[in-house]
Amino acid sequence: MSQRSIFNRIFNIIRTSLNGEQRDYTQGNLSKAIFLLAIPMILELSLESVFAVVDIFFVSKLGQHAIATVGLTESVISLVYSIAIGLSTAATAVVARRIGEKNPDAAAHAGAQSLIIAFIVTAIISILGVVFAGNILSLMGADAKVVLEGAIFTKIMFGGSLVIMLLFLINGIFRGAGDAAMAMKSLWLASILNIILCPLFIHFFGLKGAAIATVIGRTGGVLYQCYHLFKGKGIIRLKAIHFNYDPKLLKSIVTIAWPATLQFLINSGSWIFLTRLVAETGGTTASAGYQLAIRNFIFFLLPVWGLSNAAATLVGQNLGAKNPKRAEQSVNMTAKYSAILTGSVMFIFIFFPDFIMRIYTHDEDIIKYGTLTLRWFGSANIFYGISMVMMQALNGAGDTRTPTLINFFCFWLFQIPLAYILAYNFHLKATGAFIAVPVAETMIALIAWYYFRKGKWKTISV
């Protein structure tokens, strides 16, 4: 095949994936199916990560207290992300299964019921976050100045929890239906609005301007989602009847969602502990370097979430179509692509972390801690990629309990004690937290691969 033919084939796949055409992912070329789903998912999350980097770039100009405030707040608000991801995981699994069974009306009904749950949960979180914003920062180890300057930022971010929840959840519904392009477009709209508004609002309102811009941008993305969810021409179209109280379906969604939520809460709780440990042992400077590095780590790693989400959709739809062999093949193939991608990024983290950090700051102490973080995290990058695909494949099958138990063991019973021992007993301080992360992630990859190979996920009913 000539180079021109290869280029044309790649271009056609990309164009088709971005057009958002309805396709049957339970048959046909599997490699093409992966890329048709993964390309918009990768682009969706990549632009979100671009915003995260742009956001911290402008916030960093306000000083290390502003950086620490954003980092500490987002470490806690990641609990909201965890619940949102947990609900979206359940929505993706159930919607994908119904689509695989060729029952789009039942898929729409499942999506509507998951939205009911989201509204109830978010109301509670928002009120608690707004009322106890200052206390949250204090509990995270922030000094008095960070609490004084950052409380309003934290209040605004928690007050806008609903749009975070809906943005993730509705995109989970779209992904379950195989409409990855729509999920991409909505997050792109939210991220572009954020990128435009962030420097403008920071200029006029300071740190709280960053929070205002984020909430406005995500609100724009949610409004776009809702229009296409209720008025669009996609395979999923919600109607009033779909919101009728359905206790059996609500229970089914919650049964899948609560382990998935706990799974990501465990993950987030571990990151919160590490964030606090870094702040305690290294101070504000170490915390700032760590936060800058984390943003860039996520920037390079989030595209792997795109591949992982593609695997989850393919598993759900093919199990719905009674084709577990194709579901397994899709995961193995996706894991291979993920390993290639993360292996390339590993090279960048190990050999060029200093260059990355100097884009944001010229403070040598912050650069030192950021460089250490990127090098240690990058050392296990391939294992991150494999573990993400395997865990999402299990989630996509509706087996959310197994990944939850893996996370609990590897993060709370292994990573947290290891980080503490390295930091204090071995006197490595913040570096101990950096080392514990890649060690734990490698263990997660191996255990998740083992349970995926056992194949129990093929028998899960949703």
Image (cartoon, grey):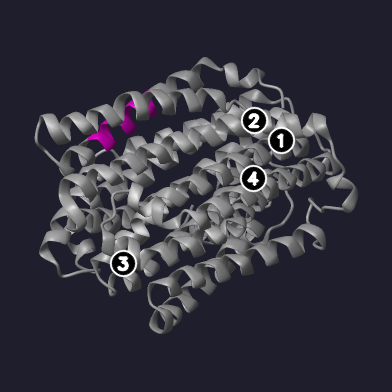
Q: Residue at x 69, y 66 (%)?
A: 223
Q: Residue at x 19, y 67 (%)?
A: 358
Q: Residues within 10 Å of mark 2 (few under 14, many from 20)?
A: many
**Callout 3, which amino acid?**
Ala
Residue hosting label 2 = 256
Mark 4 or mark 2, which is nearer the start of the sequence? 4
Give the side of residue 187 with respect to residue 304, left or right: right
In three-dimensional space, the C-alpha distance between marks 2 and 4, rounded to whole angstroms, equals 16 Å
Give the side of residue 401 with respect to residue 267, left or right: right
In three-dimensional space, the C-alpha distance between marks 4 and 3, rounded to whole angstroms, equals 29 Å
Residue hosting label 4 = 121
* Residue 165 in the image: above or below residue 252: below
The reply to whether residue 335 is visible in this rendering is no
Residue hosting label 1 = 94
Give the side of residue 5 with respect to residue 301, left or right: right
The stretch in magenta equals 436-446
In three-dimensional space, the C-alpha distance between marks 3 and 1, rounded to whole angstroms, equals 41 Å
Residue hosting label 3 = 66
In three-dimensional space, the C-alpha distance between marks 2 and 1, rounded to whole angstroms, equals 9 Å
Q: Residues within 10 Å of mark 4 (few under 14, many from 20)?
A: some
Percent of width and height locating residue 314 = 63, 37
Mark 1 or mark 2, which is nearer the start of the sequence? 1
* Of the pair 347 and 207, the residue shown nearer to us: 207
* Of the pair 182 and 411, the residue shown nearer to us: 411
* Of the pair 157 and 93, the residue shown nearer to us: 157
Residue 99 quadrant: top right
* Residue 203 in the image: above or below residue 39: below
Residue 67 among magenta residues: no
Q: Is mark 3 in CB contact (under 8 Å) with mark 1?
A: no
**Callout 4, which amino acid?**
Val
